[in-house]
Amino acid sequence: MDLAIVDRLLTTTRTVRRRLDLERPVPPAIIEQCIEIALQAPTAGNGQGWHFVVVTDPSSKAAIAEVYRKARAWYHAHPPAFLYGEQRDSDPDALRRMRDAGTHLADHLQDVPVLILACIEGRVERGSIFEQATLYGSVLPAAWSLMLALRARGLGAAWTTDHLIYEEDVARLLAIPAGVTQAVLLAVAYFTGQDFKPAPRRASREVIHWNAWPA
Ligand SMILES: Cc1cc2nc3c(=O)[nH]c(=O)nc-3n(C[C@H](O)[C@H](O)[C@H](O)COP(=O)(O)O)c2cc1C
């Protein structure tokens, strides 16, 4: 395995918002090939309850974008406390840049060539931590593999969950059955510009705990 290429893919696959090419069409065959690759991801008990709803219809994308913007407004009024740790607060410029890019994506979501909803059969809103981890853990690895496979072919994706605040609106729009959970909405397009860089992250020594959580 060429570690230089593999490590570059793993360290430079970013959520792309401003650099999605809204003009260049995406061939359906590339999407299908990347999903085929993503299906090699693990699922609990090899259940493979995953589904990928690929949306290219302009009126459906416009309706999803409306839900997304409504959800984003709610999110900004009620930010989930568990997401705002010291890391994020320590770099207000980075936070502002991300918010601006998020607004840009929200404004243009209907123009992104392909929206992919990764879903999984089952519901765990009243489930235990075990059930939640098992259900989401059986679809999110595939969604990340999909993002990696797309990136390797020159396509970028934005990983988004904001619309899930109004999950049922999108389920109704796309006829997603009641027993199915939507896990992530990927906004997919060819990316513009040359390449991506590794992002600033917490130092690994802060987050690796050998044998037990530090005292
Ligand atoms: C669970 C999850 C939910 C996310 N939801 C959104 C979202 O709704 N909208 C958005 O613009 N970005 C969303 N993101 C993208 C993150 O903001 C982004 O991955 C993070 O800032 C790190 O940046 P990077 O992808 O460039 O490494 C989400 C990412 C994850 C993992």
Image (spheres, rainbow, N blue to C red):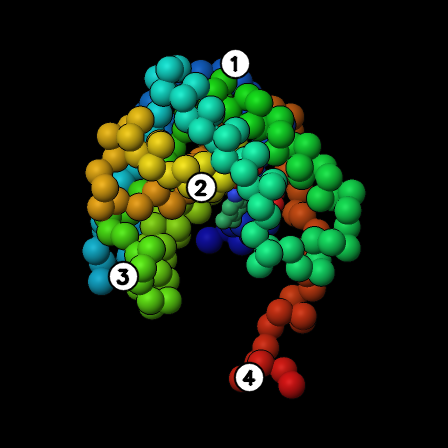
Q: Is mark 2 on a helix, strand or loop?
A: helix
Is residue 209 visible to the viewer in this orientation of the structure?
yes
Asked if the residue at tag 3 contacts the one at tag 2, i.e. Cβ–Cβ closer than 8 Å, the answer is: no
- Image quarter for residue 208? bottom right
User: Which mark lies nearer to you, 2 or 3?
Assistant: 2
Residue at the (66%, 37%) spot, across then down: 99
Is 74 rendered above or below residue 87?
Answer: above
How far apart are labels 2 and 1 at the CA level?
29 Å
Residue mark closest to the camera, 4 vs 2: 2
Under mark 2, the amino acid is Ile
Report the disc number at residue 48.
none
First in sequence: mark 4 vs mark 1: 1
Give the CA distance from mark 4 to mark 1: 51 Å
Q: Is residue 135 left or right of residue 58?
A: left
Q: Nearer the viewer, residue 65 or 71?
A: 71
If you read the primary sequence from the N terminus, does the residue marked by circle 4 or circle 2 appear first?
2
Q: Which of marks 1 and 3 is nearer the N terminus?
A: 1
**Disc 1 from disc 3: Cα separation:** 39 Å
